Image (spheres, coloured by chain):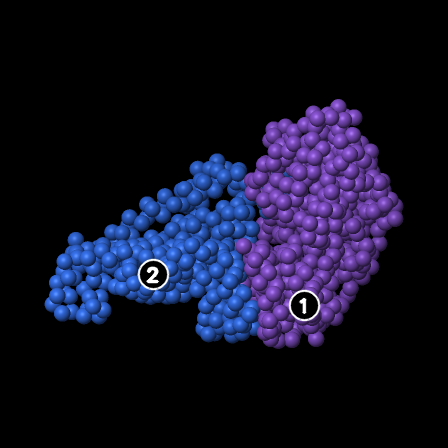
Chain colours: A purple, B blue
Amino acid sequence: MKRFFLLLVIVWGPLAVAQDIPKELIVVGIEAEPTSLDPQQVTDINTMRVLSNIYDTLIHMSNEGFEPEPGIAESWEISEDGLEYTFRLRPGLTFSDGTPLDAEAVKFTFERMLDPEHPFADTGPFPFATSYFGQIKEVTAVDATTVKFILKEPFSAFLGNLSGMTGAIVSPTAVEEYGKDFASNGVGSGPFKLVSWERGSQVVLEANPDYWEGAPAQAQAIFIPIVDNLARVVALQTGQINIAVNLQPDTIAGLEADSRFKVLQQVGPHIWWVTLDVSNEYLSNKKVRQALNYAIDREAITRDILQGTGIPAYGPIPPGLAGYDPELVSYTYDPDKARQLLAEAGYPDGFSMDFWIPTSGSGMQEPVPMTTAIQGYWQEIGVTTNIQTLDWGTYLSKLAVPPKDSGYTAFELSFMLGTGEPDILLNTLLSTSQMAPKGINTGGYSNPEIDNLIAEARRATDPEQRASIYRDAAQIIIDDAPWVFVDHWKQSAAITADVQGFELTQTFLLPLHSVSRQ
Amino acid sequence: MLRFIVNRLVFAIPTVLGVSLVIFFSMRLAPGDPAQLYLGPMATQETLAELREQLGLNQPLPVQYVTWFKQVAIGDWGQSITYRSEVLGLVWERLVSSAVLGAASFVIAVPIGLFLGILAALYRNTIVDVLAMTVAIAGISLPVFWVGLLLIVQFSLRWQWFPSSGMYSLYGDKSFWDLLRHLVLPATSLSLVPLAVIARITRSSMLDVLGQDYVRTARAKGVSPFGTVLKHTLKNALIPVITVIGLQIGYLIGGAVLIENIYAWPGIGQLLLDSITSRDYPVVVGGSLLLAVIFILANLLADVAYSFVDPRVRYS
């Protein structure tokens, strides 16, 4: 039914004449209502997209290859032992409420989220504080423009983590003034400042003329949540918005063919995979796991089911991140080889297993069709899969319990690594120390070589060296196959032809500073 | 009359209490954990435990209920887990938007529904009847989101008559006319089911009454078919219709999720759906409670309306 109307939209779309949004406004249709304007509280990419325009961070990540670039900090030094990071802030910066953006403000921001004794620690919760910044032992304001962080242990991902919204610097005056209501009244030092937030309708921002990189090109930016993917595209076609994010795959061809719009697509640092329970009697055998990887046709899945909104994944590290290397030896679509491996493992007639999947979820793309395809491929080599479908909430709660107590053999998940650091993925999901129930490595994968490489990478301050360590780790993981690697998501957006300077970013954020309408 | 209303309001209290109990417990008994959903699949056990502690989810259920109840009694409906803002304010804003949409749909559905029903009854078994009832059946059978999308494609994309999403234009002045323009398509889509139901009930109720002896007497006396028969029959036929209208009000306000979704209307249906998905307990319970109160008030209004229409009710 919906497809029929999609076709109508695509056919009649060209007949629609764009309404006039005043040129000094730029309107973005996002996929859900933002949850909070306090960056330390936020866990979802959608809200972070809005916040990346209101707030600024010490470091920015370059759009090519995740290189750290100056942000609020114009330069920095790292001590030999990797424990001390000293940042020199740009002088004379202020927040949009006039408060000076100095070392004290930076100290305030980090202490609020990390120190439970901080007077404003009750304006939380701060869900990502420990995972991104738990390594910080102390923050000192050396002078007005110098901040020093002392870490408990060397942690090479620290710089990358500082570029994410969880490290965005907030105005201490505003937090003190608003207290718990700060979440409804964000005050930062970004290219835009908040004018108003009408829940469910729009977030209105206006240009911050004092932004250190220069005032943004547009006087006002408005974010509108439009949940239904198709309705968002229609809003673009009827001229109600200038930028639509996360396009419904069926609409892409129609939009590309229409000269009034431009479609952008870019592979993001995202990975979608199937976790295998390595304690299961069949899956404990590496050959079986490798067979499962050989059995699926990733090209077909991304081309036909995802309609080109993903690229095949051949390893755990997504494109753009340190350690990503398309030359690593990985799996091709080879059902014969898969059957052979199964036979070698002692299961020429295959076996059966339980596969739990969610019906939706952040970053999960199209879980049900994708899994059905995977089930089909595995059936071809004799592996029967019983699929159990759960809603996202129920699914997550069941996953928290290790497989032997929960009853699943395989489950699927995805992750978006917007800060460009493979550490959080590898450590949280594939290290021995994070095995369930302590951590969430519920698949139970444990390889001391990987644990060592993760630790080594944390200590390595030279980016080339880190990349090489992660590359080695990736090759081992591919070979061990604790996961079936499936795809990397291609993020998409469509803009009206008059929008200039808009780019999709590796961080998944949506900075509008350099975007203008002609 | 006043005693009647007060009486009903007093009886409403246990109903509302009952609703709060059922929703409170059924939400918490359902699998899924708000802390987990808030933090995502990558959350560590520590962070989860901390958050659960902060949200008071570790207490035994009855204790949680009593805590919640005591807070509600003093006006603190709690804080949304997802949005970190006060539940009452959050829910109320959305409720008002839904009420606006609901009222508009009501204004479309009731007169047209009544009209079609009456027409169909008076011209029973003629082409008029067939056409009117076809419209009614279509209204009930066509999926609401389908109709919504159809209206968008035709009236928004193709003819550019109305906007396709939102409640107001962004850069407009939030004028009444702006709101009206945004209301037309969603209110029309939403009105179809109630319109159909009202039309059918009106028709069958009118037919019942038209078959009565006193109607035949009126016609024998020379009263004209349309005008005065209406006066004699309509009031009597309205009782079941009013019941139905009362029930429809609840649907119009709380059940418009699909319409809100397609038209990006900032209503309570969408909020409740999102909150259930993310297990945002305070919002689900708070929102449902408010909706329950509205249902009760709507039905109370319906009862009061009976007494105007049927003198027997007034004096009992």
Amino acid at the residue labelled 2: Val
Few, some or many residues within 10 Å of mark 1 (<14, 14–19, 20+): some
Q: Position of residue B32 (x, y in %)?
A: 55, 40
For this view, does A439 lie left or right of residue B251? right
Specify the quadrant that holds the N terminus of chain A: bottom right
Name the spot of residue B198 as percent of width and height, x first: 33, 58
For the residue labelled by badge 1, is the local secondary structure a helix, a strand or a loop? loop
**Lateral position of residue B154 relative to residue B246, left or right:** right
Residue under numbered circle 1: A258
Which numbered mark, 2 or 1, is in the foreground of this view?
2
Q: Quadrant of the C terminus of chain A?
A: bottom right
**Label 2 crowd bin: few (<14), some (14–19), many (20+), radius 10 Å:** some
Q: Residue reaching furthest top?
A: A346
Query: Can the viewer see residue B150?
Result: yes
Residue sitting at x 84%, y 43%: A328
Which residue occupies 54% across, 65% down? B153
Quarter of the view holding residue A480: top right
Residue placed under numbered mark 2 in the picture:
B130
